[in-house]
Amino acid sequence: MQYNTKQRDILINFLEENRDKTYSVEDITNALVNMDISPSAVYRNLATLENEGRVRKVFKTGARKAFYQYVDSSKCKGRLHLYCTKCGSTTHLDSMDSLYIIQNLKQNASFDLDQDNTIIYGLCRKCKKK
């Protein structure tokens, strides 16, 4: 059983308010420096939230540290995710587009894609225009 602590609530609120971005533990700790949450509490809670399926851990190309993003499981379920390697934003691919890609891979490549854990890396529209 997971208890909701003040630190856990602070972390969840921060991640929910910034759900389209990814953050390292250092980023989170720095953003919450005035909120009385320790780096160890951030690590501990992120691990728990990841196990609960509420947080996704991703690795940026060339980076050694992990980045975390809050996911709303009802909106994420069955959708592929598009991750911008420049700004770190993540968007959910429309469910019909996700289904098309998943079915296309299954039929043409005999490959069953793990749709709940698949992230497609590239550049978002904003970064592409820059």
Image (cartoon, grey):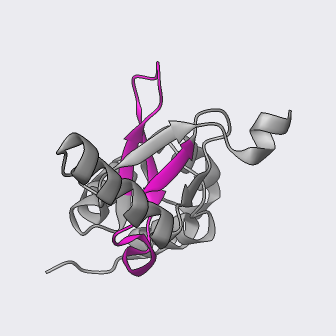
Rendered-image quadrant of the C terminus: top right
- Residue 73 magenta-highlighted: yes
- The answer to whether 23 appears left or right of 77 in the picture is right
Most foreground residue, 129 or 61: 129
Q: Residue furthest right?
A: 130
- The answer to whether 54 appears left or right of 34 in the picture is left
Residue under the point 47% across and 24% down: 61
Most foreground residue, 89 or 26: 89
Rendered-image quadrant of the N terminus: bottom left
Q: Quadrant of residue 108?
A: top left
Number of numbered labels in the structure image: 0
- The answer to whether 24 appears left or right of 103 in the picture is right
The reply to whether residue 41 is visible in this rendering is: no
Q: Quadrant of residue 8?
A: bottom left
Which contiguous range is marked in magenta? 56-83
Q: Residue furthest top?
A: 62
Residue 125 on image: x %, y %: 75, 46
Residue 64 on image: x %, y %: 39, 23
Residue under the point 24% across and 69% down: 52
The reply to whether residue 94 is visible in this rendering is: yes
